[in-house]
Amino acid sequence: MSPAPSAEKPLAGLEEIKKNYPASSAALMPALYEARRQFGWLSPEALSAVADALNLPKAAVRSTASFYGMFNQGKTGRHLVRICTNVACMVLGAGSVLEKLEARYGLTPGGTSRDGRFSLAVTECIGACDKGPAMLVDDDMHTDLTGERITEVLERYE
């Protein structure tokens, strides 16, 4: 994770992103993804840098970022684990996956593992209802999870 953007280290790539859209407001979501990719989270400085680069009101950028669950606005572990807790995933066993995460890694929703490797967020839907329980680790989708398989998946992430 890099430090937040500053005058010395601006948010890179926003000019290139803007070129792909007819209006700067249309580039907001890709710009937020890029800021998250570069800095690991959306700090107030990162949100201001996006607003300035796109010439958008800071409040509009902040409200968009806070609306979507994939844009974390607090520091996280090296990897953000998002578990779907919608009805389909819960019926298919997301509860046991959450129990395994707490037992094995000390992770509870909103928390970070003791070693700083993972942070856990629960989310309503990640679009894998037919393959639940499902989770995202960073941007990687993992489906058909079990309490046992969760360890196998997470051990791939340093």
Image: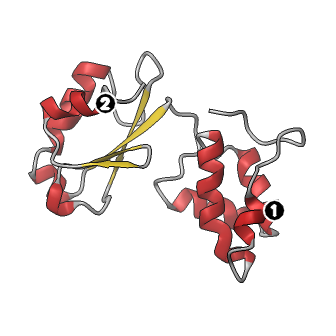
Query: Does dot 2 land on a helix, a strand or a loop?
Result: helix
Q: Which residue is drawn at 17% across and 53% down?
A: 132
Q: Is residue 148 above or below residue 129?
A: above
Q: Is residue 156 above or below residue 58?
A: above
Q: Residue at x 30, y 59 (%)?
A: 125
Front-lying residue, 53 or 65 = 53
**How many numbered marks, from 0 up?**
2
The quadrant in which the N terminus is found is: top right
The residue indicated by pointer 2 is: 154
Front-lying residue, 63 or 27 = 27
Q: Residues within 10 Å of mark 2 (few under 14, many from 20)?
A: some
Query: Does dot 1 land on a helix, a strand or a loop?
Result: helix
Q: Which residue is drawn at 65% across and 44% down?
A: 38
Query: What is the quadrant of residue 30 in the picture?
Result: bottom right
Amino acid under disc 2:
Leu
Give the mark toward the camera: 1 or 2: 2
Q: Is residue 152 above or below residue 132?
A: above
Residue 53 bears which disc, if any? 1
Q: Where is residue 70 in the image (x, y as percent from the top left)?
A: 48, 53
The quadrant in which the C terminus is found is: top left
